[in-house]
Image: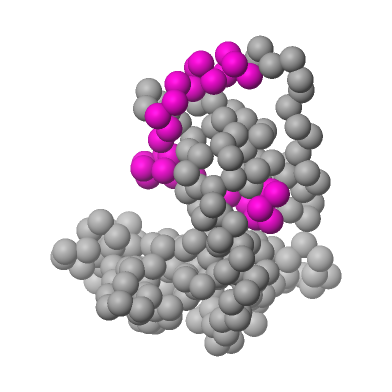
Amino acid sequence: ALAPDAFSPSAAPRRRARWGTHLDSPAHFTQPTPGEFSLPTGYLTSTEALLGVAPLSNVSYVTQWQVWHKPYVREMLSEVERRAPEGVHWPLAVLASVASGYEEQGFSEYTMYATWLLARRRQQVLLVSSRDYPWLRDPPSGVLNNQGECCPSDESLCQIALGGFRFVSWECTHASALRGSDAAAARRNRRQLSSPAPVPPPGVIASADSEGFLTTLSPAPAMPTYVGQRMSSMVMSPGPSPPPM
């Protein structure tokens, strides 16, 4: 994610840019050909059209947590409008940048801001690899049931933290956000438990060094097998080279 470096004594602290590849993060990549991983074509073409800078195709900054520095955002949007036809403001410029046929994944604000930051404020960027700060996206435990009911669960956060992940995100429009179980029934069952819920491991609840966790909304499942496999691959696979500075 992009966030101020809280430990920098400088008046203009560097912004943290969290990045990942298909080797060390659950960031979304397409496979144009077997074995080749790339950002969605729409992300690449729209960002280049808006900024005149081509993003790296094999690096993703869509890390599900990104903080924008308002002065930089204003500067970026002003640049977008200067490059657009006269009188076209940035919202319409963004819509016009989406190429025909790529409407489903035609634009990424994560990609645009990170690309702009590295191109225009390179000395103000501190790159943070997903390998060093592992995170999880759309785990199968889900957030909502099929009726759209929420079911908060500290146990789910415990399971994820025990896997070594620093934070987790769910997107409610994704299939993994849905659960077939009855959330209301699960909530009643938890209230009837005679034993208290397990105490979360240190760092699960928001703290100064963890940057916080999203509150999960699902009963605690068994740790999915693929989570352990992903952690193993993160540990065993060589770390990718960071984006050029």
Q: Please determine whether, in this image, residue 189 is positioned above or below residue 137.
A: above
In the image, what residue occupies the spot 78% across and 44% down? 201
Circle count: 0
In the image, what residue occupies the spot 37% across and 23% down? 147
Q: Which residues are magenta?
A: 161-190
Give percent across and percent down for residue 159: 65, 43
Give percent across and percent down for residue 8: 80, 69
Residue 181 appears in view: yes
Along the line of sight, which residue is nearer the eye, 116 or 165? 165
Q: Residue furthest left?
A: 100
Q: Please determine whether, in this image, residue 103 is positioned above or below residue 10.
A: above
Q: How is the image coloured?
A: one colour
Give percent across and percent down for residue 242: 58, 82
In the shown orientation, is residue 221 left or right of residue 146? right
| Residue 243 sits inside the magenta stretch | no
Along the line of sight, which residue is nearer the eye, 157 or 74? 157
Q: Quadrant of the C terminus?
A: bottom right
Residue 67 appears in view: no
Q: Please determine whether, in this image, residue 88 is positioned above or below residue 193.
A: below
Along the line of sight, which residue is nearer the eye, 241 or 209? 241
In the shown orientation, is residue 10 left or right of residue 222? right
Q: Quadrant of residue 68?
A: bottom right
In the shown orientation, is residue 81 left or right of residue 121? left
In the image, what residue occupies the spot 66% across and 53% down? 163
In the image, what residue occupies the spot 77% across and 62% down? 6
Give percent across and percent down for residue 93: 29, 64
Q: Quadrant of the N terminus?
A: bottom right
